Every structure is written in structure tokens, then in C-alpha cells.
Amino acid sequence: MATFEVQADERAMLSGELRFDTVGSLLEAGSRVIGEGRVAVIDLASVSAGDSAGLALLIEWLSVARNVDRSLRYENIPLQLQQLARLSEVEELLLGA
């Protein structure tokens, strides 16, 4: 299970496992608030695991933010997702976001 919780000051907290079977529900919820300009920073400190679907979710949210001329930044990206991003040659997207 994974959750996306909007907090104060344009922040959100993502928690749980970012896997193929959990990212579908997160995609819509996150895309909506990012597109509305309500979230500019997403904290991933409580993410316990992630796979390529989780990485794709994070990249998609960056795209949503760019489409509405907003910036989006990730904090506390788990090592597992950082390594996957490096292997996929998209690490700069996540860390430079």
C-alpha cells in the first residue's frame, strides 16, 4: 500500500511501496494537486520500496508540473529509487528537479 498526503506550504508526503500495483491510485491523486499548483515539494522519506513503476510515477509527476509551468522537487529519495534512476539514466531528472 502507498499513500499521498498533501501537507501545508505546497508540500506532500509519499509513503509506502511505490510498485506497479500501488502507483495507479497515486498517479491520479498526485497529478491533480500538482496540476492545480498545490504541491511543489514531495518528501519520499517514508517510501519503503520502489520499482520501475514507482520511478515512472515520479517522472510523470515532473511532466505534469512542467505542463503547468510549475516546479516540482523531491526530497529524501530512497537509495533504491536513486540507483534505479541511475541505471535508467534519468537520475538527473529526479535530483535536478
Image (tube, rainbow, N blue to C red):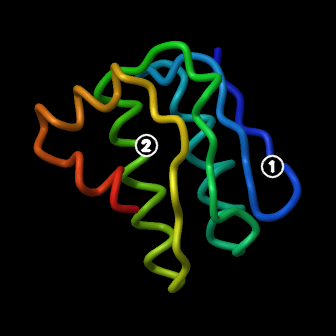
Q: Would you call the spot at circle 2 few (<14 residues within 10 Å), some (14-19), or many (20 or more)?
A: many
How many numbered dots are placed on residues in this image? 2
* Near-viewer residue (31 or 39): 39
Residue at which label 1 appears? 6
> Amino acid type of disc 2?
Leu
Which label is found at residue 57? 2
> Is residue 14 depicted above or below 38 in this figure?
above
Residue at the spot x=46%, y=34% of the render? 77
> Is residue 70 depicted above or below 92 in this figure?
below
Percent coordinates x, y for residue 4 in the rendering: 71, 37
SS at mark 1? strand
Comes first in the chain, label 1 or label 2: 1
Q: Is residue 87 left or right of residue 25?
A: left
Q: Quadrant of the C terminus?
A: bottom left
Which label is found at residue 81? none
Q: Would you call the spot at circle 1 few (<14 residues within 10 Å), some (14-19), or many (20 or more)?
A: some
